[in-house]
Amino acid sequence: MSAPALVWLRDDLRIGDNPALHAAVHQDRPVVVFYLLDEETEGIREHGGAARWWLHHSLAALAADLKKRGASLVLRRGAAEREVPRLVDDTGAEALYWNRRYGAAREVDAALKTSLRERGLDVQSFQGSLMFEPWTVQTADGRPFRVFSPFWRACQASGEPRAPHPKPRRIDGGDAPASDRLDDWGLLPTEPDWAGGLRDRWKPGEASAHRLLEHFAKNVLDRYHLRDEPLPKNTSDLSPHLRWGEISPFQVWHRMEGTLSPAARRNVAKFRMELGWREFNWNILYNAPDLHERNFRPEFDEFPWEEPDGAHLEAWRRGRTGFPMVDAGMRELWQTGYMHNRVRMIAASFLIKNLLVDWRVGERWFWDTLVDADEASNPGNWQWVAGSGADAAPYFRVFNPLLQGDKFDGGGEYRQHWIPELDTDDYPEQIVDLKQSRQEALDAYDVVRRRT
Protein backbone atom coordinates (compact mmCIF):
# COMPACT_ATOMS: atom_id res chain seq x y z
CA MET A 1 0.00 0.00 0.00
CA SER A 2 1.29 3.45 -0.88
CA ALA A 3 2.10 6.00 1.80
CA PRO A 4 -0.95 8.05 2.89
CA ALA A 5 -1.77 11.69 2.49
CA LEU A 6 -2.70 13.56 5.66
CA VAL A 7 -5.55 16.07 5.65
CA TRP A 8 -5.38 18.45 8.58
CA LEU A 9 -8.79 19.92 9.43
CA ARG A 10 -9.10 23.06 11.56
CA ASP A 11 -12.09 25.41 11.23
CA ASP A 12 -13.28 23.49 8.17
CA LEU A 13 -15.14 20.56 9.72
CA ARG A 14 -16.86 19.32 6.58
CA ILE A 15 -16.46 16.83 3.78
CA GLY A 16 -18.20 18.74 0.99
CA ASP A 17 -16.37 21.65 -0.67
CA ASN A 18 -13.23 20.93 1.28
CA PRO A 19 -10.38 21.69 -1.14
CA ALA A 20 -7.70 19.98 0.93
CA LEU A 21 -9.73 16.78 1.22
CA HIS A 22 -10.78 17.06 -2.43
CA ALA A 23 -7.12 17.15 -3.52
CA ALA A 24 -6.20 14.22 -1.31
CA VAL A 25 -8.96 11.84 -2.42
CA HIS A 26 -8.04 12.38 -6.06
CA GLN A 27 -4.64 10.82 -5.52
CA ASP A 28 -3.87 7.14 -5.68
CA ARG A 29 -3.12 6.81 -1.98
CA PRO A 30 -4.97 6.37 1.34
CA VAL A 31 -6.18 9.48 3.15
CA VAL A 32 -5.82 10.08 6.89
CA VAL A 33 -8.04 12.90 8.12
CA PHE A 34 -7.07 14.39 11.47
CA TYR A 35 -8.03 17.17 13.86
CA LEU A 36 -5.53 18.63 16.31
CA LEU A 37 -6.70 20.36 19.49
CA ASP A 38 -3.90 22.85 20.01
CA GLU A 39 -4.23 24.66 23.32
CA GLU A 40 -0.48 25.16 23.76
CA THR A 41 0.83 27.19 20.83
CA GLU A 42 1.40 30.81 21.75
CA GLY A 43 -0.85 33.25 19.92
CA ILE A 44 -3.70 30.80 19.28
CA ARG A 45 -6.75 31.66 21.38
CA GLU A 46 -8.12 28.86 23.50
CA HIS A 47 -11.76 28.07 22.74
CA GLY A 48 -14.45 29.47 25.02
CA GLY A 49 -16.93 27.27 26.82
CA ALA A 50 -19.72 27.45 24.24
CA ALA A 51 -17.23 26.88 21.43
CA ARG A 52 -15.89 23.76 23.12
CA TRP A 53 -19.44 22.39 23.36
CA TRP A 54 -19.98 22.99 19.64
CA LEU A 55 -16.60 21.58 18.70
CA HIS A 56 -17.32 18.30 20.50
CA HIS A 57 -20.57 17.72 18.65
CA SER A 58 -19.21 18.93 15.32
CA LEU A 59 -16.29 16.50 15.52
CA ALA A 60 -18.66 13.66 16.46
CA ALA A 61 -20.85 14.40 13.44
CA LEU A 62 -17.83 14.65 11.16
CA ALA A 63 -16.40 11.35 12.41
CA ALA A 64 -19.70 9.59 11.72
CA ASP A 65 -19.87 11.04 8.21
CA LEU A 66 -16.29 10.04 7.43
CA LYS A 67 -16.94 6.51 8.70
CA LYS A 68 -19.82 6.11 6.24
CA ARG A 69 -17.35 6.89 3.47
CA GLY A 70 -14.61 4.54 4.59
CA ALA A 71 -12.36 6.85 6.59
CA SER A 72 -11.70 7.65 10.24
CA LEU A 73 -11.24 10.96 12.02
CA VAL A 74 -7.97 10.86 13.93
CA LEU A 75 -7.85 13.08 17.01
CA ARG A 76 -4.62 14.37 18.51
CA ARG A 77 -3.96 17.00 21.15
CA GLY A 78 -0.97 19.28 21.67
CA ALA A 79 1.22 21.89 20.02
CA ALA A 80 1.11 21.69 16.23
CA GLU A 81 4.87 22.01 15.79
CA ARG A 82 5.28 18.83 17.83
CA GLU A 83 2.19 16.76 17.05
CA VAL A 84 1.94 17.20 13.28
CA PRO A 85 5.48 15.86 12.60
CA ARG A 86 4.77 13.07 15.08
CA LEU A 87 1.68 12.07 13.09
CA VAL A 88 3.72 12.17 9.89
CA ASP A 89 6.16 9.73 11.50
CA ASP A 90 3.36 7.52 12.86
CA THR A 91 1.76 7.12 9.44
CA GLY A 92 4.73 7.34 7.11
CA ALA A 93 2.81 10.01 5.21
CA GLU A 94 4.36 11.57 2.13
CA ALA A 95 1.84 14.39 1.72
CA LEU A 96 0.06 16.86 4.00
CA TYR A 97 -2.81 19.09 2.89
CA TRP A 98 -4.78 21.77 4.72
CA ASN A 99 -7.00 24.75 4.05
CA ARG A 100 -5.38 28.06 4.88
CA ARG A 101 -5.80 29.98 8.14
CA TYR A 102 -5.60 33.78 8.22
CA GLY A 103 -4.97 34.77 11.84
CA ALA A 104 -1.91 34.34 14.02
CA ALA A 105 -1.95 30.58 13.35
CA ARG A 106 -0.76 31.14 9.80
CA GLU A 107 2.76 31.59 11.20
CA VAL A 108 2.52 28.09 12.66
CA ASP A 109 1.41 26.76 9.28
CA ALA A 110 4.21 28.53 7.44
CA ALA A 111 6.87 27.10 9.76
CA LEU A 112 5.47 23.58 9.43
CA LYS A 113 5.25 23.88 5.67
CA THR A 114 8.91 24.84 5.48
CA SER A 115 10.20 22.20 7.88
CA LEU A 116 8.17 19.32 6.44
CA ARG A 117 9.02 20.20 2.86
CA GLU A 118 12.67 20.04 3.87
CA ARG A 119 11.95 16.44 4.91
CA GLY A 120 10.62 15.72 1.43
CA LEU A 121 6.87 15.90 2.12
CA ASP A 122 4.45 17.25 -0.43
CA VAL A 123 2.82 20.02 1.67
CA GLN A 124 0.07 22.08 0.08
CA SER A 125 -2.44 24.63 1.37
CA PHE A 126 -5.75 25.59 -0.22
CA GLN A 127 -8.38 28.31 -0.24
CA GLY A 128 -11.33 26.89 1.65
CA SER A 129 -12.59 29.37 4.23
CA LEU A 130 -12.65 32.76 2.51
CA MET A 131 -13.97 33.65 -0.93
CA PHE A 132 -11.57 36.59 -1.21
CA GLU A 133 -8.20 36.01 0.41
CA PRO A 134 -6.68 39.07 2.12
CA TRP A 135 -3.70 39.56 -0.21
CA THR A 136 -6.00 39.50 -3.26
CA VAL A 137 -8.19 42.42 -2.15
CA GLN A 138 -6.19 45.59 -1.61
CA THR A 139 -6.34 49.28 -2.42
CA ALA A 140 -4.77 50.62 -5.61
CA ASP A 141 -1.55 51.35 -3.72
CA GLY A 142 -1.36 47.83 -2.28
CA ARG A 143 -2.69 48.55 1.19
CA PRO A 144 -5.48 46.80 3.09
CA PHE A 145 -8.89 48.41 3.01
CA ARG A 146 -10.05 50.14 6.17
CA VAL A 147 -13.63 50.82 5.01
CA PHE A 148 -16.13 48.13 4.09
CA SER A 149 -17.88 49.65 1.06
CA PRO A 150 -14.80 50.00 -1.20
CA PHE A 151 -13.56 46.64 0.08
CA TRP A 152 -16.78 44.95 -0.99
CA ARG A 153 -16.79 46.70 -4.37
CA ALA A 154 -13.26 45.42 -4.94
CA CYS A 155 -14.34 41.90 -4.00
CA GLN A 156 -17.24 41.98 -6.42
CA ALA A 157 -15.03 43.36 -9.18
CA SER A 158 -12.56 40.48 -8.75
CA GLY A 159 -14.96 37.96 -10.23
CA GLU A 160 -17.40 35.26 -9.15
CA PRO A 161 -16.25 32.99 -6.29
CA ARG A 162 -15.29 29.52 -7.46
CA ALA A 163 -17.87 26.75 -7.63
CA PRO A 164 -17.98 24.38 -4.63
CA HIS A 165 -16.19 21.05 -4.84
CA PRO A 166 -18.45 17.97 -4.71
CA LYS A 167 -18.68 15.80 -1.63
CA PRO A 168 -16.66 12.60 -2.12
CA ARG A 169 -18.74 9.44 -1.96
CA ARG A 170 -15.87 7.21 -0.91
CA ILE A 171 -12.60 7.87 0.93
CA ASP A 172 -9.86 5.27 1.19
CA GLY A 173 -8.97 5.63 4.85
CA GLY A 174 -6.25 2.98 4.87
CA ASP A 175 -4.92 1.94 8.25
CA ALA A 176 -5.79 4.70 10.69
CA PRO A 177 -3.18 5.52 13.35
CA ALA A 178 -3.92 5.74 17.06
CA SER A 179 -6.42 8.42 18.00
CA ASP A 180 -7.53 10.16 21.17
CA ARG A 181 -11.07 9.53 22.38
CA LEU A 182 -13.23 12.60 21.92
CA ASP A 183 -14.87 12.16 25.32
CA ASP A 184 -11.45 12.24 26.97
CA TRP A 185 -10.91 15.82 25.80
CA GLY A 186 -13.50 17.09 28.29
CA LEU A 187 -15.02 19.63 25.91
CA LEU A 188 -18.52 19.24 27.35
CA PRO A 189 -19.62 20.88 30.61
CA THR A 190 -20.45 18.45 33.38
CA GLU A 191 -20.56 20.03 36.84
CA PRO A 192 -22.73 21.88 36.26
CA ASP A 193 -24.06 20.94 32.83
CA TRP A 194 -25.09 24.37 31.60
CA ALA A 195 -25.56 23.33 27.95
CA GLY A 196 -29.22 22.33 27.99
CA GLY A 197 -30.26 25.48 26.16
CA LEU A 198 -27.57 24.94 23.56
CA ARG A 199 -28.76 21.39 22.94
CA ASP A 200 -32.32 22.64 22.51
CA ARG A 201 -31.28 25.41 20.12
CA TRP A 202 -28.59 23.85 17.93
CA LYS A 203 -27.59 20.70 16.08
CA PRO A 204 -23.94 21.02 15.02
CA GLY A 205 -22.68 19.31 11.90
CA GLU A 206 -22.47 19.57 8.14
CA ALA A 207 -25.86 17.99 7.45
CA SER A 208 -27.61 20.40 9.80
CA ALA A 209 -25.85 23.36 8.15
CA HIS A 210 -27.20 22.41 4.74
CA ARG A 211 -30.69 21.84 6.08
CA LEU A 212 -30.62 25.35 7.54
CA LEU A 213 -29.34 26.80 4.27
CA GLU A 214 -32.18 25.19 2.34
CA HIS A 215 -34.75 26.30 4.89
CA PHE A 216 -33.43 29.84 4.75
CA ALA A 217 -33.40 29.97 0.95
CA LYS A 218 -36.93 28.58 0.63
CA ASN A 219 -38.71 30.02 3.65
CA VAL A 220 -36.84 32.97 5.20
CA LEU A 221 -34.84 34.86 2.58
CA ASP A 222 -37.99 36.49 1.23
CA ARG A 223 -38.29 38.46 4.50
CA TYR A 224 -34.58 39.01 5.09
CA HIS A 225 -35.13 42.75 4.69
CA LEU A 226 -36.66 42.52 8.18
CA ARG A 227 -33.45 40.98 9.61
CA ASP A 228 -33.06 43.72 12.26
CA GLU A 229 -36.20 42.48 14.01
CA PRO A 230 -35.24 39.62 16.37
CA LEU A 231 -38.67 37.98 16.26
CA PRO A 232 -39.99 36.34 14.21
CA LYS A 233 -36.75 34.80 12.93
CA ASN A 234 -35.65 36.59 9.76
CA THR A 235 -32.03 35.45 9.55
CA SER A 236 -30.23 32.33 8.39
CA ASP A 237 -28.80 30.94 11.67
CA LEU A 238 -25.76 29.89 9.62
CA SER A 239 -23.16 31.88 11.56
CA PRO A 240 -21.96 29.05 13.85
CA HIS A 241 -21.88 26.60 10.95
CA LEU A 242 -19.76 29.06 8.94
CA ARG A 243 -17.57 29.72 11.94
CA TRP A 244 -16.75 26.00 12.29
CA GLY A 245 -16.56 25.44 8.55
CA GLU A 246 -19.40 22.92 8.50
CA ILE A 247 -20.50 24.78 5.40
CA SER A 248 -18.34 26.93 3.17
CA PRO A 249 -19.05 30.51 2.07
CA PHE A 250 -18.77 29.25 -1.52
CA GLN A 251 -21.66 26.85 -0.92
CA VAL A 252 -23.77 29.57 0.66
CA TRP A 253 -22.95 32.07 -2.10
CA HIS A 254 -23.85 29.74 -4.95
CA ARG A 255 -27.04 28.48 -3.30
CA MET A 256 -28.28 32.05 -3.75
CA GLU A 257 -28.17 31.38 -7.49
CA GLY A 258 -30.48 28.39 -7.16
CA THR A 259 -34.26 28.26 -7.19
CA LEU A 260 -35.63 31.22 -5.23
CA SER A 261 -38.91 33.10 -5.07
CA PRO A 262 -39.02 36.61 -6.62
CA ALA A 263 -39.24 38.13 -3.13
CA ALA A 264 -36.22 36.15 -2.00
CA ARG A 265 -34.17 37.23 -5.01
CA ARG A 266 -34.65 40.85 -4.00
CA ASN A 267 -32.77 40.13 -0.78
CA VAL A 268 -29.85 38.16 -2.22
CA ALA A 269 -27.52 41.15 -2.62
CA LYS A 270 -27.99 42.24 0.98
CA PHE A 271 -27.50 38.72 2.31
CA ARG A 272 -24.31 38.35 0.28
CA MET A 273 -23.14 41.67 1.68
CA GLU A 274 -23.38 40.18 5.15
CA LEU A 275 -21.10 37.40 3.95
CA GLY A 276 -18.88 40.24 2.80
CA TRP A 277 -18.66 41.62 6.33
CA ARG A 278 -17.31 38.26 7.45
CA GLU A 279 -14.67 38.49 4.72
CA PHE A 280 -13.86 42.08 5.70
CA ASN A 281 -13.27 41.19 9.33
CA TRP A 282 -10.90 38.39 8.31
CA ASN A 283 -9.11 40.82 6.00
CA ILE A 284 -8.65 43.16 8.97
CA LEU A 285 -7.44 40.33 11.23
CA TYR A 286 -4.92 39.20 8.63
CA ASN A 287 -3.30 42.62 8.86
CA ALA A 288 -3.85 43.02 12.63
CA PRO A 289 -3.50 39.56 14.25
CA ASP A 290 -3.83 41.02 17.77
CA LEU A 291 -7.25 42.53 17.00
CA HIS A 292 -8.78 41.10 20.19
CA GLU A 293 -6.14 42.80 22.34
CA ARG A 294 -5.27 46.09 20.69
CA ASN A 295 -7.29 49.04 19.42
CA PHE A 296 -7.21 49.05 15.63
CA ARG A 297 -7.26 52.85 15.83
CA PRO A 298 -4.36 53.61 18.21
CA GLU A 299 -5.83 56.95 19.30
CA PHE A 300 -8.26 54.93 21.41
CA ASP A 301 -5.33 53.84 23.55
CA GLU A 302 -5.91 57.20 25.27
CA PHE A 303 -9.54 56.44 26.13
CA PRO A 304 -10.21 56.78 29.88
CA TRP A 305 -12.06 53.51 30.50
CA GLU A 306 -13.47 53.18 34.00
CA GLU A 307 -12.72 50.27 36.29
CA PRO A 308 -15.76 48.01 35.81
CA ASP A 309 -18.28 48.12 38.63
CA GLY A 310 -18.56 44.47 39.63
CA ALA A 311 -22.29 44.64 40.31
CA HIS A 312 -22.99 46.44 37.04
CA LEU A 313 -20.87 44.02 35.05
CA GLU A 314 -22.62 41.03 36.60
CA ALA A 315 -26.01 42.61 35.91
CA TRP A 316 -25.04 43.01 32.25
CA ARG A 317 -23.81 39.44 31.97
CA ARG A 318 -26.95 37.97 33.54
CA GLY A 319 -29.49 40.22 31.86
CA ARG A 320 -30.45 42.17 34.98
CA THR A 321 -29.71 45.78 33.94
CA GLY A 322 -33.29 47.00 33.95
CA PHE A 323 -33.13 47.73 30.20
CA PRO A 324 -35.28 45.06 28.53
CA MET A 325 -33.61 44.93 25.11
CA VAL A 326 -30.18 44.51 26.69
CA ASP A 327 -31.42 41.96 29.20
CA ALA A 328 -33.35 39.92 26.65
CA GLY A 329 -30.25 39.65 24.49
CA MET A 330 -27.95 38.69 27.33
CA ARG A 331 -30.38 36.03 28.51
CA GLU A 332 -30.70 34.66 24.99
CA LEU A 333 -26.90 34.47 24.90
CA TRP A 334 -26.62 32.76 28.29
CA GLN A 335 -29.23 30.14 27.44
CA THR A 336 -28.54 29.43 23.77
CA GLY A 337 -24.98 30.56 23.01
CA TYR A 338 -26.34 33.02 20.48
CA MET A 339 -27.73 36.54 20.22
CA HIS A 340 -29.49 38.30 17.37
CA ASN A 341 -27.09 40.66 15.57
CA ARG A 342 -29.02 43.88 16.15
CA VAL A 343 -29.33 43.02 19.83
CA ARG A 344 -25.59 42.32 20.00
CA MET A 345 -24.97 45.91 18.95
CA ILE A 346 -27.40 47.22 21.56
CA ALA A 347 -25.90 45.11 24.35
CA ALA A 348 -22.33 46.01 23.33
CA SER A 349 -23.11 49.73 23.10
CA PHE A 350 -24.67 49.66 26.56
CA LEU A 351 -21.59 48.06 28.11
CA ILE A 352 -19.11 50.32 26.34
CA LYS A 353 -20.92 53.63 26.37
CA ASN A 354 -23.40 53.56 29.23
CA LEU A 355 -21.18 51.63 31.65
CA LEU A 356 -17.87 52.90 30.19
CA VAL A 357 -16.40 49.41 30.26
CA ASP A 358 -13.47 48.60 27.95
CA TRP A 359 -14.70 46.76 24.84
CA ARG A 360 -12.18 43.98 25.52
CA VAL A 361 -14.15 42.94 28.62
CA GLY A 362 -17.27 42.40 26.53
CA GLU A 363 -15.34 40.73 23.72
CA ARG A 364 -13.96 38.16 26.15
CA TRP A 365 -17.45 37.43 27.52
CA PHE A 366 -18.85 36.89 24.04
CA TRP A 367 -15.80 34.77 23.16
CA ASP A 368 -16.66 32.46 26.04
CA THR A 369 -20.44 32.34 25.55
CA LEU A 370 -21.09 32.54 21.79
CA VAL A 371 -21.14 29.38 19.69
CA ASP A 372 -20.25 31.47 16.63
CA ALA A 373 -17.45 33.62 18.08
CA ASP A 374 -14.52 33.58 15.69
CA GLU A 375 -11.21 35.37 16.04
CA ALA A 376 -12.05 37.93 13.34
CA SER A 377 -15.72 38.85 13.62
CA ASN A 378 -15.94 38.85 17.41
CA PRO A 379 -13.25 41.49 18.09
CA GLY A 380 -13.99 43.22 14.80
CA ASN A 381 -17.62 43.79 15.71
CA TRP A 382 -16.83 44.85 19.27
CA GLN A 383 -14.34 47.39 17.96
CA TRP A 384 -16.93 48.56 15.42
CA VAL A 385 -19.31 49.44 18.23
CA ALA A 386 -16.54 50.96 20.35
CA GLY A 387 -15.43 53.23 17.53
CA SER A 388 -11.88 51.91 17.76
CA GLY A 389 -12.00 49.56 14.79
CA ALA A 390 -11.88 49.65 11.00
CA ASP A 391 -14.91 51.29 9.39
CA ALA A 392 -16.21 51.75 12.92
CA ALA A 393 -19.41 53.39 14.04
CA PRO A 394 -18.58 56.87 15.36
CA TYR A 395 -17.99 56.73 19.08
CA PHE A 396 -20.67 59.34 19.65
CA ARG A 397 -23.27 56.97 18.14
CA VAL A 398 -24.80 55.62 21.32
CA PHE A 399 -27.59 53.09 20.91
CA ASN A 400 -30.48 54.01 23.19
CA PRO A 401 -31.70 50.56 24.32
CA LEU A 402 -35.23 51.80 24.99
CA LEU A 403 -35.66 53.42 21.58
CA GLN A 404 -34.00 50.47 19.87
CA GLY A 405 -36.46 48.12 21.55
CA ASP A 406 -39.44 50.16 20.41
CA LYS A 407 -38.06 50.33 16.86
CA PHE A 408 -37.06 46.72 16.31
CA ASP A 409 -39.27 44.88 18.80
CA GLY A 410 -42.35 47.04 18.56
CA GLY A 411 -44.74 44.36 19.73
CA GLY A 412 -42.43 43.33 22.55
CA GLU A 413 -42.40 39.64 21.60
CA TYR A 414 -38.65 39.29 21.88
CA ARG A 415 -38.37 41.04 25.24
CA GLN A 416 -41.33 39.20 26.71
CA HIS A 417 -40.02 35.85 25.48
CA TRP A 418 -36.72 36.18 27.32
CA ILE A 419 -37.96 38.19 30.31
CA PRO A 420 -41.16 36.56 31.56
CA GLU A 421 -41.13 38.75 34.69
CA LEU A 422 -40.84 41.93 32.60
CA ASP A 423 -44.11 43.49 33.75
CA THR A 424 -43.84 42.41 37.38
CA ASP A 425 -42.12 43.75 40.48
CA ASP A 426 -39.45 41.06 40.08
CA TYR A 427 -37.86 42.87 37.14
CA PRO A 428 -34.88 44.99 38.33
CA GLU A 429 -34.65 48.75 38.25
CA GLN A 430 -32.40 50.46 35.72
CA ILE A 431 -28.78 50.38 36.91
CA VAL A 432 -27.76 53.65 35.21
CA ASP A 433 -29.32 56.86 34.00
CA LEU A 434 -29.24 56.77 30.19
CA LYS A 435 -28.94 60.51 29.65
CA GLN A 436 -26.23 61.01 32.25
CA SER A 437 -24.21 57.96 31.20
CA ARG A 438 -24.41 58.96 27.56
CA GLN A 439 -22.99 62.37 28.39
CA GLU A 440 -20.21 60.79 30.45
CA ALA A 441 -19.31 58.66 27.44
CA LEU A 442 -19.17 61.69 25.16
CA ASP A 443 -17.03 63.55 27.70
CA ALA A 444 -14.64 60.60 27.77
CA TYR A 445 -14.46 60.62 23.99
CA ASP A 446 -13.53 64.31 24.10
CA VAL A 447 -10.46 63.30 26.12
CA VAL A 448 -9.35 61.13 23.18
CA ARG A 449 -9.93 63.90 20.68
CA ARG A 450 -8.01 66.47 22.74
CA ARG A 451 -5.04 64.13 23.21
CA THR A 452 -4.83 63.21 19.55
Image (cartoon, rainbow, N blue to C red):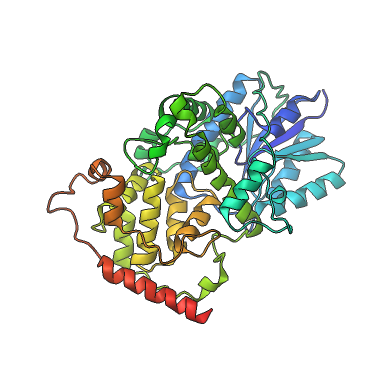
When asked about the image quadrant of residue 86, the answer is top right
Q: Is residue 449 above or below residue 8?
A: below
Report the label total.
0
Q: Position of residue 22 (x, y in %)?
A: 71, 28
Question: Residue placed farthest to the left in the image?
Answer: 425
Give residue 222's quadrant in the image.
top left
Closer to us: 236 or 371: 236
Q: Quadrant of residue 131?
A: top right
In this orientation, which residue lies closer to the viewer: 17 or 317? 17
Q: Position of residue 109 (x, y in %)?
A: 72, 49
Q: Residue at x 61, y 52 (%)?
A: 150
Q: Is residue 391 above or below residue 223?
A: below
Q: Is residue 134 above or below residue 174?
A: below
Is 104 on the left or on the right of 210, as rendered?
right
Residue in the picture at 43% in, 62% down: 361
Image coordinates for residue 215, horizontal then vertical, percent: 44, 26
Q: Identify which residue, 144 or 426, lies in the foreground.
A: 144
Question: Which residue occupies the foreground of this view, 11 or 302?
Answer: 302
Q: Residue at x 42, y 43 (%)?
A: 189
Q: Where is the C terminus found, in terms of image quarters?
A: bottom right
